[in-house]
């Protein structure tokens, strides 16, 4: 496969706080996995957005914790960062997980995690779209009909006092199948 397959997908620079403590973000660099959808093998390209390790800024945030990309500035969040280390394995497990319809053409998978002996609900919000690899070697991809880009838009602990986000279950494999067909999945009526 081509060496520039992730052209255009963000590779996050480490965050260094005011005390000089570095927080590497290479676990959130783009990667690819193959998955079976019916009789077709699909190449799933995975990318992560800044909301996986940052939160909206508030007035008393330390400017040393600001994290900026070409679209926005947010505040580095140590809790989101710690939980983001789980995201690559969660992505690998998505094909066997139920997903829910979330807002704005997103979906959510809800994981139960137990960091520090505390059980939490972790919401992983994502979207899918058809995506052609810009640098794929056609001889390596003879059976590959299309790629799908999975972008994890945000991931954070859900408030236990609020209703879980999302409604209507749908299997991840079905979402990929519909994406390949160019069909927008319809959430259930309320």
Image (spheres, grey):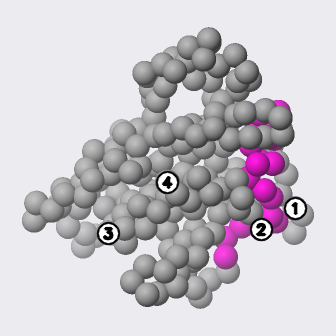
User: Is 113 on the left-hand or right-hand side of 141?
Assistant: left
Q: How many numbered marks have been drawn onto this rendered protein structure?
A: 4
Pointers 3 and 4 in contact (C-beta within 8 Å): no
Residue at (45% x, 56% y) in the render: 51
Residue bearing mark 4: 88
Judged from the image, the secondary structure of the residue bearing numbered disc 4 is helix
In percent of width and height, residue 120 lies at: 53, 81
Pointers 2 and 1 in contact (C-beta within 8 Å): yes
Residue bearing mark 3: 78
Residue bearing mark 2: 167
Residues rendered magenta in the picture:
164-181
**Cα distance between the residues tagged 1 and 3:** 36 Å
In percent of width and height, residue 169 lies at: 80, 64
Of circles 1 and 3, the one toward us is 3
Q: Considering only order in the chain, which callout, 4 or 3, is on the residue closer to the N terminus?
A: 3
Q: Is residue 177 magenta?
A: yes
Dot 3, how many residues are within 10 Å of its Cα: few (below 14), some (14-19), or many (20+)?
A: some
């Amino acid at each position: 496969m081509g060496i520039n397959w992730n052209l255009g997908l963000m590779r996050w620079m480490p965050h260094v706080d005011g005390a000089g403590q570095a927080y590497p973000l290479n676990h959130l660099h783009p990667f690819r996995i193959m998955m079976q959808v019916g009789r077709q093998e699909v190449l799933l390209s995975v990318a992560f957005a800044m909301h996986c390790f940052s939160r909206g800024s508030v007035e008393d945030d330390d400017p040393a914790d600001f994290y900026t990309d070409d679209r926005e500035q947010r505040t580095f969040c140590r809790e989101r960062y710690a939980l983001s280390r789980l995201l690559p394995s969660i992505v690998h497990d998505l094909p066997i997980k139920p997903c829910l319809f979330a807002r704005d053409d997103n979906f959510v998978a809800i994981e139960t995690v137990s960091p520090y002996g505390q059980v939490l609900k972790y919401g992983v919000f994502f979207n899918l779209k058809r995506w052609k690899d810009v640098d794929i070697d056609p001889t390596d991809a003879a059976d590959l009909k299309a790629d799908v880009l999975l972008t994890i838009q945000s991931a954070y602990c859900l408030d236990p006092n609020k209703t879980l986000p999302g409604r209507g279950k749908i299997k991840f494999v079905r979402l990929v199948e519909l994406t390949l067909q160019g069909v927008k999945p319809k959430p259930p009526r309320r």
